[in-house]
Amino acid sequence: MGCFYSRRMEDEEMVYDMSPIRHLPVIFVNGVPGAGNHTVAQTISSITGYTMIRPGELVAAEALKDTARGRLIADKLQARDDIPEQLTVDLIKEAMLTHQNATGFILVGFPKNPRMSNMFNKQVKWPEKVVALEVSNEVAATRLQNKLSELGRPESEINAARQIVREAAHKVKNVHKRFGSHVVRVDSAGNPKALASHLKEILSDTMECQERSKSPVHRPPLALSAPVVGRDPNPPGTCEPPADSVKMADE
């Protein structure tokens, strides 16, 4: 029975009412490990005032809980297995719902793969922007090695940094392809001040759109369940995604 329950937890989507936060803008900061995901997300947060959500921290915190889900995640981490995409998305949804007073959200190092992005797009909403971090694999691997060394990680893990970055680069590239015109590319290896200025420029339309959406509009009654496939992910008063996003969501 235990194994059956674990498989069910991995694959089943929990039902959440995401309507309280669906009108808020969402930005994905997406790059390989060592690309500066956290640093760029902090810069965006200081510009926009949006709330940062780090899925990796959510997963680590959940693994410490003495619950069925916590024990399942802890077992996965110990075995160095991938965390099921649906569990990660559920943790993000729960975190977003605890910050209903936020002005927007920044998901750091998310999504890890196209399947995870599809789940979020269908169950929550499409992101207004996907900030794609561009940095050479060599620079990212060196940064990652330094970070792992500072954390006192095993030598074997530090030496595996280059392989980790190479594997992640392939997945990240596939994720960026699916978001089309949502993607804005940023050189995360550049000067911090220049980076901040560039980010402020490329995010200006998102912030302007949010200001317009604050204007009073007539909204239909909100549903009491998670969105279903085919439902408009952006309710009235928010900026609609480009047409290409609707096409890719169905692929």
Image (cartoon, rainbow, N blue to C red):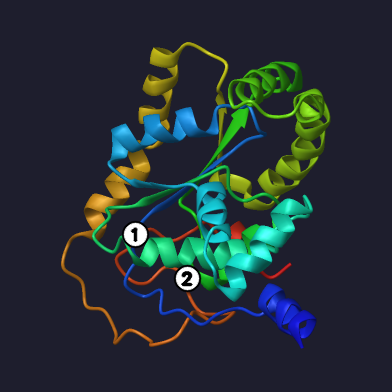
The circle on residue 24 is 1
In this view, the residue in front, 126 or 91, is: 91
For the point 37% across and 20% down, which residue is it?
Answer: 197
In this view, the residue in front, 68 or 175, is: 68
Q: Quadrant of residue 134?
A: top right
Q: Are marks 1 and 2 in contact (CB under 8 Å)?
A: no
Furthest residue in direction top, as rendered? 191
Question: SS class of the residue under badge 2?
Answer: loop
For the point 56% across and 51% down, which residue is it?
Answer: 60
The amino acid sitting under disc 1 is: Leu
Assign the C terminus to one quadrant of the image.
Answer: bottom right
The answer to whether residue 246 shows anywhere in this view is: no
Furthest residue in direction front, as rendered? 66
Q: Nearer the viewer, mark 1 or mark 2?
A: 1
The circle on residue 233 is 2
- Give percent across and percent down for residue 128: 45, 51
- Give percent across and percent down for residue 207: 30, 44
- Where 143 falls versus 153 (above or below)? above
The amino acid sitting under disc 2 is: Pro
Of pointers 1 and 2, the one earlier in the residue sequence: 1
Neighbor class of circle 2 (other Cα within 10 Å; few <14, some 14-19, many 20+) is many
- Give percent across and percent down for residue 196: 39, 22
- Where 31 falls versus 171 (above or below)? above
The circle on residue 61 is none
- Give percent across and percent down for residue 183: 57, 42
Estimate the spatial distance between the alpha carbons at disc 1 and disc 2, rounded to whole Å.
11 Å
Q: Quadrant of residue 141?
A: top right
Q: Quadrant of residue 213?
A: bottom left
